[in-house]
Image: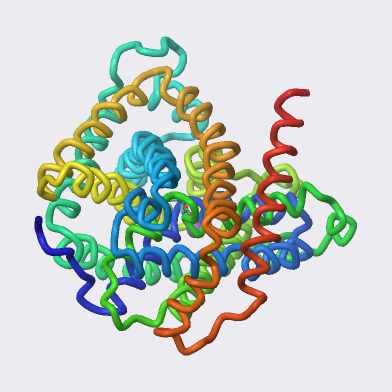
């Protein structure tokens, strides 16, 4: 048995946790979600979700990792023998995500390169769909697209190196470089975006509150969904990362810092994206409503089109896509670490073996998305993972801990012993009542929409 690794410093842990949290969810999911769900008014359900579910769950996951010092499956089995499967369920979800998340990073790498001289031309949608992904020739397991294949293998190579080097020398060092760089690049992008003509109209549209939405159940579901996804909760990630904390660590404080850092980055991204959309609306004389997008469409179709109209287009493009790459890789490392640590413990193998087997398998699966049918497959898998996989994982987790094992009080004592901020009955209430109710409601809503 190798001795359990540890983070080199508190900052190292925080940067890794923030690195996991800050990802595509902040950059392309949050801005559109907030806009569609009430704009400025969305901040009320959003803050509510952060304080009643996001941060309480983060505290719980940090405490579990810190207390049991194990991967997610083993941590759950230490709480109660019959709960190991909850950890494996989370690990499985992370494994599946780690087969398609790197595809998007690979796209972003190619687009960083295409940015130089705006190689995507004038028809950016056609470029993405036809030239880049060759979607015009669909076949689920058709021939591999070399455009995606090469950067994909680069992503995996980088991931293997970082993960192979371990917690302190690999993951911590990588995040110490990636996250501050990401922050600087992103601030630069936002400032540039804010000085474009029309930018302030975009930001205005983003913050304009639509109070009529506030009583709408689906808006609240969207807020909680955004918080879960964005904080990487119920993916086994935060349990795994906190299992490498030294004994003396302020758990509760760390959770608040991670939560607020992630939300600050979302706010920054919302301002930046809407500044750019405001510019776009002005250039094309369209109402802002028409240009709002999220996800793949925003990053790989709308953004290139907008970048074409900007002064110093190449520079802006390189910075934007490079920030997607940095945000993506740090999140991908964190999802992969969940199964690497789980497999390493379960089969008592070395870290390098676990990286080779776990990462190798995920790498092979990821090749299935690197072909003409890849985008559709990715959309479908992503939909089920987000709408059912994670919601279920979170629900199992809180119900098992709060109601079956009844270990909240025990975890509270553990956290309080090392933390400045003391937890109270509010914390146990959020986890035993608020979170299960919200997650249960969320599942029912999703089922209702899908079955109708
Ligand atoms: N938290 C990440 C984001 O906001 C998403 C993510 C979820 C990454 C789960 C890894 C695992 O983009
Ligand atoms: Na996030």
Residue drawn where x is 44% and y is 12% of the image: 138
Work out whether 92 lies above or below 193: above
Determine whether 443 is above or below 261 in the image.
above
- The answer to whether residue 192 of the structure is visible from this angle is no
Numbered disc total: 0
Residue 133 vertical placement versus 223 (above, below): above
Tell me where residue 362 sits by quadrant: top left
Indicate the position of residue 433 as horizontal and vertical percent values: 70, 60
Between 407 and 94, which is closer to the camera in this rendering?
407
Relative to 288, is 324 on the left or the right?
Answer: left
Residue nearer the viewer, 369 or 400: 400
Q: Which image quadrant for residue 431?
A: bottom right
* Residue drawn at x 87%, y 62% as measured from the top left: 211
Give the image's coloring scheme: rainbow
Taking the image as shown, residue 352 lies to the left or right of residue 130, namely: left
Residue farthest to the bottom, as pictured: 420
- Which residue sits at x=66%, y=53%? 436
Query: x%, y% of residue 90?
Result: 43, 44
């Amino acid at each position: 048995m190798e001795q359990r690794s540890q983070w080199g410093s508190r900052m190292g842990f925080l940067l890794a946790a923030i690195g996991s949290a800050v990802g595509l969810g902040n950059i392309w999911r949050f801005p559109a979600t907030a806009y569609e769900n009430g704009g400025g008014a969305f901040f009320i359900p959003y803050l509510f979700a952060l304080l009643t579910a996001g941060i309480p769950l983060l505290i719980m996951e940090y405490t579990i990792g810190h207390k049991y010092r194990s991967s997610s499956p083993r941590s759950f089995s230490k709480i109660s023998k019959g709960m190991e499967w909850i950890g494996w369920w989370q690990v499985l979800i992370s494994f599946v995500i780690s087969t398609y998340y790197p595809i998007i990073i690979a796209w972003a790498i190619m687009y960083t390169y295409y940015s130089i001289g705006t190689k995507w031309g004038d028809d950016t949608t056609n470029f993405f769909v036809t030239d880049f992904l060759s979607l015009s020739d669909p076949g689920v397991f058709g021939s591999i697209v070399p455009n995606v294949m090469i950067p994909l293998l680069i992503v995996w190579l980088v991931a293997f190196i970082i993960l192979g080097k371990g917690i302190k020398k690999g993951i911590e060092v990588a995040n110490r470089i990636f996250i501050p760089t990401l922050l600087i690049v992103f601030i630069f992008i936002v400032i540039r975006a804010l000085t474009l003509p029309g930018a302030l109209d975009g930001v205005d549209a983003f913050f304009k509150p639509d109070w009529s939405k506030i009583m709408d159940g689906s808006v609240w579901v969207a807020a909680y969904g955004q918080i879960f996804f964005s904080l990487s909760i119920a993916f086994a990630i935060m349990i795994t990362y906190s299992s490498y904390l030294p004994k003396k660590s302020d758990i509760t404080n760390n959770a608040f810092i991670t939560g607020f850092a992630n939300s600050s980055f979302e706010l920054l991204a919302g301002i930046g994206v809407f500044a750019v959309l405001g510019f776009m609306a002005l250039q094309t004389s369209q109402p802002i409503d028409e240009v709002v997008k999220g996800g793949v469409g925003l990053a790989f179709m709308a953004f290139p089109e907008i970048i074409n109209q900007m002064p110093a287009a190449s520079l802006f493009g390189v910075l934007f896509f490079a920030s997607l790459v940095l945000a993506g890789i740090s999140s991908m490392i964190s999802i992969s670490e969940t199964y690497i640590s789980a497999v390493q413990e379960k089969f008592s193998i070395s870290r390098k073996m676990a990286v080779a087997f776990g990462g190798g398998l995920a790498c092979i699966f990821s090749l299935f998305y690197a072909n003409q049918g890849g985008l559709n497959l990715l959309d479908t898998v992503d939909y089920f993972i987000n709408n059912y996989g994670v919601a279920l994982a979170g629900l199992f987790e809180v119900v098992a801990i709060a109601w079956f094992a009844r270990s909240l009080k025990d975890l509270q004592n553990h956290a309080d012993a090392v933390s400045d901020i003391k937890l109270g009955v509010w914390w146990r209430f959020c986890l035993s009542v608020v979170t299960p109710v919200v997650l249960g409601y969320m599942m029912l809503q999703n089922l209702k929409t899908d079955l109708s």
